[in-house]
Image (spheres, coloured by chain):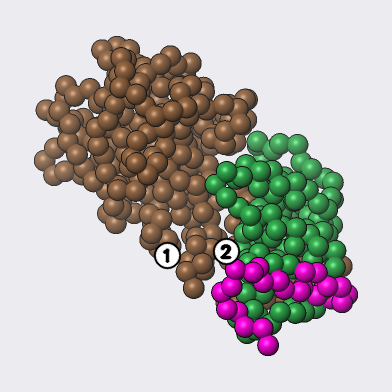
Amino acid sequence: MASSSKTEQKKMLILKSSEEEEFEIEESIAVQSGTIKNMVEDDFTLIPLPNVDTETLIKIIKYMKKHGEKTKSNEKDIEEFDKEFVKKSFTELKELVLAANYLHITSLIDLLCQAFADRIKNKSVKAIREIFGIPNDFTPEEEAEVYEQHKWAHEEGKEHIDHSAY
Amino acid sequence: MALAMETEEEEEEEMIELGNLSNYIVESIFSKIPLKSLTQLKTVSKTWRNSITNIRHCYPPTTSSGLVLFLKHRDFQESIFMKLYDQKGWRKLSPCMGSSEKFCTFGSSYRHKFSYLIDSCNGVLLYGSHNNEFWTYSISVLDQEVDVDSQLMNCMMFSSNLWSWREDKLRIMNSELLLLDGFSRGQCCNTIQENQEKVFTLRCYGKSSEGLVQFCDPVNNGFFIWSFNGGDFKLDHYVRLEDLRLRKMGYSVKPCAFNKALEVLYLHVLPHTIVSYSFETRELVQVWSYIEEEEEDCWIFKILPFLFSYVDLLAFNKLRQVD
C-alpha cells in the first residue's frame, strides 16, 4: 500500500524484534541496513526481524540513529559514541555482530570486528577458548608441534598476557 | 557453547561455525589482528589453525611499502625507488622477486643536496637534510599549512597517489632524534599528509600517535629488533645470524628495514644486495641486487624504508565492497 514516493514528510518504518516488540524509526535512518533497504524497496513498512532479539535491536537502532545524523562537524562526537558503544561483554558483542551481519550494516560490522580484534589480540589461548566456547582438539603432542612451528610468535616481546575471559 | 568443528577445506564458501560467528565475520576479525598475535592464535584449535593458515595463503599480505636505495657508482650517484608488495597486485603469491617489482630510477648529481626520507612508519614520514656535516630533521609543532618562511629546506616529497617525486619546501626545527649510522631511531617525528589541495600539513607526533619505529641493534651473533612507540622500547625479535643461513657468509650483513605488520626483516648484504627474511615463513628471499656487467664498482650507501599506508592483511575486504 505504501509507495516510496519522495515526499517532504519523513517516512516511518516499524521494526519488529524476534520477541514481537515493535519500534518506530525513520526510513532514512533505517536504510543504513542493507537488509531493511531491500525490504523497503519491496514496499514493506513493517519489517519483521526474527533473527534479532529486542535488546540487540534497541542497541542497533541507537547506533543507526547516531550514525544517521552524521555531518562534517560531529565526527568526533560519533567517534566517542563508537568507543563507548563497543564497551560491552563478549556475549553482547557476539549478538550485535550477528545482528549487524544479518542486517548488512557495514560500518557496524567493521566497528564490531575491530572491537573483537582489539579485545582478543593480547589474550591467552585459554581465555580465547573460553570466550568462543572452543574445545582444545589438539593432542598435547600436536599442540607442542604447532607451538614449535611458530615459536617466533610466542617468544620475546610478550607483553603481559591477559588471561581473563571477558 | 561448543559447536561441531568442521574440517577446513580450501573453498572460502564453506561456513565455519566458530562460536556462532560466520566465516566472513571471523576472517574480518582475524584481518584486524597483528600478525604475531594472529600466529599465536593458531594454537587455539585445529579449526582456527586451519582457518588462519588458509587466510594467509589465499590472501597474501599486501602493503604499500618500499625502499629507497642510494647507489654510489664511481662517478655518480643514483637513487632507486623500489616498491615492494604492490598493493594492486595482491594476488601474487610471491611478490618479492626483484625483476617483477615496479621501480623507477632517477639520477642525482653528486653535489645535490636534496633532503630526503629518513624513516617512515604507518604514514609517519621523517625528512631530513644533510648540509655539510650536520643533519637537520623535522619535528614540528605546526598544525597548519606550511608557510614560506626562513629555515626552509628543499625536499623531495613523494606522492603516493601520483607515484612521483617533486621538489618542495619544508621548515626545519630542532630534533631529538638519535643519530647513529644505520637504522636506529629514538623518537619519531612528523606526519606529513596531503590534502586535496596538494599542500602539506605538518602534525605533531605526540604519544597518542599510532606510529611505531623499529630499531635494529646489531650484536655479535645477530640482531635485536626493538620497537619504540614514543613511550618505551619493547623487544620484538632476536635474530641469530646463523639461523638466516646466508650462503655468502663472507659478506657483511646489516639490517636495513623492518616491516612490523608483515614481520619481514630486510637485510643489506654488502655491497649491493638486499634480501628479505620473513619470520612467518622463515624464508630468505633475494629482493634486489645490482648487476651491471662491466661495473663492479658500485655499492649501496644508504637504504631508506617506506611505508605509506596501513597494511590490509585481508585485501579482499576492499574487493567485496565493489559488488
Q: CA distance from mark 1 to mark 2?
A: 13 Å
Which range is magenta?
Answer: A1-24
Magenta stretch, main secondary structure, is loop
Q: Position of residue B45 (x, y in %)?
A: 74, 62
Q: Residue at x 77, y 73 (%)?
A: A15
Identify the secondary structure beneath mark 1.
loop
Work out whether B144 lies above or below A56.
above
In this rendering, position of residue B22 left or right of residue B274 = right
Label 1 Cα neighbours within 10 Å, binned few <14 / some 14-19 / many ≥20:
some
**Chain that the image shows in brown:** B
Q: Residue at x 60, y 45 (%)?
A: A75
What amino acid type should be assigned to the residue bearing mark 2?
A: Ile
Work out whether B17 lies above or below B177.
below
Judging from the image, mark 2 belongs to the subunit labelled B
In this rendering, position of residue B138 left or right of residue B102 = right
In this rendering, position of residue A133 left or right of residue B33 = right
Q: Nearer the viewer, residue B3 or B168?
A: B168
Q: Where is mark 2, residue-wise?
A: B55
